[in-house]
Image (cartoon, rainbow, N blue to C red):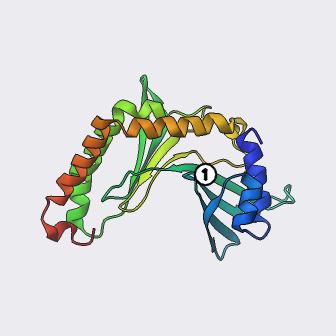
Amino acid sequence: METMGDLLERICEFASHEMTREGAKKAFGWNAYSIDVKNRENDESYIFIKFENGYTLFVRYYLSLDPTESKDSCEFTLGLQTDMRSRIRYDIHYAGYIHGQGYIRLRVQEMKNRMQQMVLEEFYIPALKAIYKPIIIQFKGLYSRDFFGVEADSVHGEIFYAPVSCRSEHKEARIGEVVGRLNELDLLLKQPQIKHDLAELDLQLSLLPSTVWSDL
Protein backbone atom coordinates (compact mmCIF):
# COMPACT_ATOMS: atom_id res chain seq x y z
CA MET A 1 0.00 0.00 0.00
CA GLU A 2 1.93 3.01 -1.30
CA THR A 3 -0.49 5.63 -2.63
CA MET A 4 -3.63 7.34 -1.37
CA GLY A 5 -5.47 5.45 -4.11
CA ASP A 6 -4.27 2.17 -2.58
CA LEU A 7 -5.55 3.38 0.79
CA LEU A 8 -8.88 4.31 -0.82
CA GLU A 9 -9.32 0.76 -2.13
CA ARG A 10 -8.50 -0.64 1.31
CA ILE A 11 -11.00 1.74 2.95
CA CYS A 12 -13.80 0.85 0.51
CA GLU A 13 -13.21 -2.83 1.19
CA PHE A 14 -13.19 -2.22 4.95
CA ALA A 15 -16.40 -0.14 4.79
CA SER A 16 -18.26 -2.84 2.86
CA HIS A 17 -17.79 -5.40 5.65
CA GLU A 18 -18.24 -5.52 9.40
CA MET A 19 -16.21 -2.61 10.76
CA THR A 20 -14.29 -3.65 13.86
CA ARG A 21 -11.05 -2.56 15.49
CA GLU A 22 -9.57 -5.92 14.56
CA GLY A 23 -10.61 -5.34 10.95
CA ALA A 24 -9.07 -1.87 11.00
CA LYS A 25 -5.78 -3.27 12.28
CA LYS A 26 -5.77 -5.84 9.50
CA ALA A 27 -6.72 -3.32 6.80
CA PHE A 28 -4.51 -0.39 7.76
CA GLY A 29 -1.81 -1.76 10.05
CA TRP A 30 -2.66 0.76 12.80
CA ASN A 31 -4.40 0.09 16.11
CA ALA A 32 -7.80 1.81 16.20
CA TYR A 33 -9.23 2.89 19.55
CA SER A 34 -12.61 4.09 18.26
CA ILE A 35 -14.80 3.55 15.20
CA ASP A 36 -17.99 5.61 14.92
CA VAL A 37 -20.53 4.89 12.18
CA LYS A 38 -23.53 7.05 11.29
CA ASN A 39 -26.01 5.89 8.66
CA ARG A 40 -27.93 8.48 6.66
CA GLU A 41 -31.33 8.09 4.98
CA ASN A 42 -29.91 8.69 1.51
CA ASP A 43 -27.88 5.46 1.49
CA GLU A 44 -24.80 7.17 2.90
CA SER A 45 -22.68 6.14 5.84
CA TYR A 46 -20.17 8.30 7.69
CA ILE A 47 -17.31 6.44 9.34
CA PHE A 48 -14.84 8.11 11.68
CA ILE A 49 -11.83 6.07 12.81
CA LYS A 50 -9.34 7.27 15.42
CA PHE A 51 -6.02 5.47 15.68
CA GLU A 52 -3.74 5.19 18.69
CA ASN A 53 -0.92 6.90 16.77
CA GLY A 54 -2.97 10.10 16.40
CA TYR A 55 -4.12 9.68 12.81
CA THR A 56 -7.77 9.71 11.79
CA LEU A 57 -9.83 8.60 8.82
CA PHE A 58 -13.15 10.22 7.99
CA VAL A 59 -14.96 8.15 5.36
CA ARG A 60 -18.11 8.88 3.38
CA TYR A 61 -19.40 5.59 1.98
CA TYR A 62 -22.34 5.80 -0.42
CA LEU A 63 -24.25 4.02 -3.16
CA SER A 64 -23.04 5.17 -6.56
CA LEU A 65 -25.70 6.70 -8.82
CA ASP A 66 -23.42 6.44 -11.86
CA PRO A 67 -24.82 3.65 -14.10
CA THR A 68 -21.31 2.98 -15.43
CA GLU A 69 -20.09 2.02 -11.96
CA SER A 70 -21.12 -1.31 -10.51
CA LYS A 71 -19.61 -0.83 -7.06
CA ASP A 72 -20.50 1.40 -4.15
CA SER A 73 -18.26 4.43 -3.77
CA CYS A 74 -16.42 6.13 -0.98
CA GLU A 75 -14.15 9.07 -0.30
CA PHE A 76 -11.97 9.70 2.70
CA THR A 77 -10.01 12.36 4.53
CA LEU A 78 -6.77 11.52 6.33
CA GLY A 79 -6.05 13.65 9.38
CA LEU A 80 -3.67 14.04 12.31
CA GLN A 81 -5.03 15.02 15.73
CA THR A 82 -3.39 18.01 17.41
CA ASP A 83 -3.65 19.85 20.72
CA MET A 84 -5.12 22.94 19.00
CA ARG A 85 -8.37 24.27 20.45
CA SER A 86 -10.62 27.21 19.60
CA ARG A 87 -13.70 28.76 21.21
CA ILE A 88 -15.06 29.27 17.69
CA ARG A 89 -15.20 26.21 15.45
CA TYR A 90 -13.35 26.81 12.19
CA ASP A 91 -11.98 25.02 9.15
CA ILE A 92 -9.23 26.73 7.17
CA HIS A 93 -7.23 25.50 4.20
CA TYR A 94 -5.16 26.50 1.20
CA ALA A 95 -7.24 27.16 -1.91
CA GLY A 96 -5.40 28.19 -5.05
CA TYR A 97 -2.68 30.64 -5.89
CA ILE A 98 -3.29 34.34 -6.43
CA HIS A 99 -0.60 36.98 -7.09
CA GLY A 100 2.16 34.83 -5.67
CA GLN A 101 0.35 33.98 -2.45
CA GLY A 102 -1.84 31.16 -1.29
CA TYR A 103 -5.54 31.93 -1.04
CA ILE A 104 -7.26 31.22 2.29
CA ARG A 105 -10.57 29.36 2.37
CA LEU A 106 -12.18 29.73 5.79
CA ARG A 107 -15.41 28.38 7.24
CA VAL A 108 -16.59 29.18 10.76
CA GLN A 109 -19.53 28.00 12.81
CA GLU A 110 -22.86 29.74 12.44
CA MET A 111 -23.68 32.22 15.17
CA LYS A 112 -27.01 32.31 17.01
CA ASN A 113 -27.57 36.04 17.09
CA ARG A 114 -26.67 39.24 15.26
CA MET A 115 -24.25 40.47 17.93
CA GLN A 116 -22.17 37.30 17.72
CA GLN A 117 -22.20 37.44 13.93
CA MET A 118 -21.00 41.04 13.98
CA VAL A 119 -18.10 40.19 16.30
CA LEU A 120 -17.26 37.25 14.05
CA GLU A 121 -17.21 39.28 10.84
CA GLU A 122 -15.57 42.45 12.14
CA PHE A 123 -13.06 41.00 14.58
CA TYR A 124 -12.57 37.23 14.68
CA ILE A 125 -12.40 36.34 10.97
CA PRO A 126 -9.95 39.14 10.00
CA ALA A 127 -7.75 38.33 13.01
CA LEU A 128 -7.71 34.60 12.27
CA LYS A 129 -6.88 35.19 8.61
CA ALA A 130 -4.05 37.53 9.64
CA ILE A 131 -2.49 34.72 11.70
CA TYR A 132 -2.71 32.14 8.93
CA LYS A 133 -1.90 34.38 5.94
CA PRO A 134 1.93 34.30 6.38
CA ILE A 135 1.95 30.49 6.57
CA ILE A 136 -0.93 29.41 4.31
CA ILE A 137 1.46 28.65 1.44
CA GLN A 138 2.80 25.81 3.61
CA PHE A 139 -0.63 24.18 3.27
CA LYS A 140 -0.37 23.96 -0.51
CA GLY A 141 -1.12 20.48 -1.83
CA LEU A 142 0.98 18.09 -3.88
CA TYR A 143 -1.10 18.43 -7.07
CA SER A 144 -3.18 21.15 -8.73
CA ARG A 145 -6.42 20.85 -6.74
CA ASP A 146 -5.49 19.26 -3.44
CA PHE A 147 -4.61 21.03 -0.20
CA PHE A 148 -3.88 20.69 3.50
CA GLY A 149 -5.94 22.36 6.18
CA VAL A 150 -6.78 22.77 9.86
CA GLU A 151 -10.00 22.38 11.80
CA ALA A 152 -10.46 23.19 15.45
CA ASP A 153 -13.12 23.70 18.08
CA SER A 154 -13.26 23.68 21.88
CA VAL A 155 -12.61 19.93 22.21
CA HIS A 156 -10.93 18.88 18.96
CA GLY A 157 -8.07 19.90 16.71
CA GLU A 158 -6.88 18.29 13.51
CA ILE A 159 -4.66 18.86 10.49
CA PHE A 160 -6.02 17.16 7.38
CA TYR A 161 -5.36 16.38 3.72
CA ALA A 162 -7.90 17.03 0.97
CA PRO A 163 -10.65 14.40 0.51
CA VAL A 164 -9.65 11.55 -1.82
CA SER A 165 -12.06 9.74 -4.15
CA CYS A 166 -11.66 7.50 -7.18
CA ARG A 167 -11.85 10.59 -9.43
CA SER A 168 -9.22 12.60 -7.54
CA GLU A 169 -5.99 13.45 -9.31
CA HIS A 170 -4.20 13.36 -5.97
CA LYS A 171 -5.07 9.73 -5.31
CA GLU A 172 -1.61 9.16 -6.83
CA ALA A 173 0.02 10.96 -3.88
CA ARG A 174 2.24 8.73 -1.79
CA ILE A 175 0.96 8.00 1.70
CA GLY A 176 4.38 8.61 3.22
CA GLU A 177 4.60 12.05 1.65
CA VAL A 178 1.14 13.04 2.89
CA VAL A 179 1.86 11.77 6.41
CA GLY A 180 5.18 13.61 6.38
CA ARG A 181 3.49 16.89 5.46
CA LEU A 182 0.86 16.45 8.17
CA ASN A 183 3.61 16.12 10.76
CA GLU A 184 5.53 19.10 9.34
CA LEU A 185 2.39 21.24 9.62
CA ASP A 186 1.81 20.02 13.16
CA LEU A 187 5.30 21.26 14.08
CA LEU A 188 4.65 24.53 12.25
CA LEU A 189 1.50 25.25 14.25
CA LYS A 190 3.36 24.46 17.48
CA GLN A 191 5.84 27.26 16.88
CA PRO A 192 5.71 29.63 19.88
CA GLN A 193 4.60 32.73 17.98
CA ILE A 194 1.76 31.00 16.15
CA LYS A 195 0.55 29.25 19.32
CA HIS A 196 0.70 32.56 21.18
CA ASP A 197 -1.25 34.44 18.50
CA LEU A 198 -4.01 31.81 18.37
CA ALA A 199 -4.23 31.67 22.17
CA GLU A 200 -4.33 35.48 22.35
CA LEU A 201 -7.22 35.56 19.88
CA ASP A 202 -9.17 33.10 22.02
CA LEU A 203 -8.34 35.11 25.14
CA GLN A 204 -9.69 38.31 23.59
CA LEU A 205 -12.96 36.51 22.88
CA SER A 206 -13.18 35.41 26.51
CA LEU A 207 -12.87 39.04 27.64
CA LEU A 208 -16.03 40.06 25.82
CA PRO A 209 -19.20 40.45 27.94
CA SER A 210 -20.69 37.11 28.94
CA THR A 211 -23.98 38.13 27.34
CA VAL A 212 -22.26 37.88 23.94
CA TRP A 213 -20.68 34.42 24.37
CA SER A 214 -22.81 32.86 27.09
CA ASP A 215 -23.44 29.77 24.95
CA LEU A 216 -19.80 29.18 23.91
Q: Which of these two is toward me, 204 or 67?
A: 204
For mark 1, does the 10 Å Cα neighbourhood hold few (<14), some (14 to 19), or many (20 or more) residues?
Answer: some
Residue situated in front as seen by the camera: 56 or 139:
56
Q: What residue type is labelled 1?
A: Thr
Q: Position of residue 160 (x, y in %)?
A: 53, 47
Relative to 158, 76 lies left or right: right
Q: Relative to 207, say whether 44 is above or below.
A: below
The answer to which quarter of the image holds residue 128 is top left
Locate residue 52, reporting x and y percent.
Answer: 58, 56
Q: Give the residue displayed 39% in from the left and 32% down from the top.
A: 135
Give the left or right position of residue 145, taking residue 187 as reference: right
User: Can residue 6 be seen here?
Assistant: yes
Give the labeled residue for mark 1: 77
The answer to whether residue 68 is left or right of residue 139 is: right
Q: Which residue is drawn at 46% across and 31% down?
A: 138
Q: Is residue 166 visible?
A: no
Q: Which quadrant of the figure contains the C terminus?
A: bottom left
| SS at badge 1 | strand
Relative to 106, does residue 65 appear above or below in the rendering? Answer: below
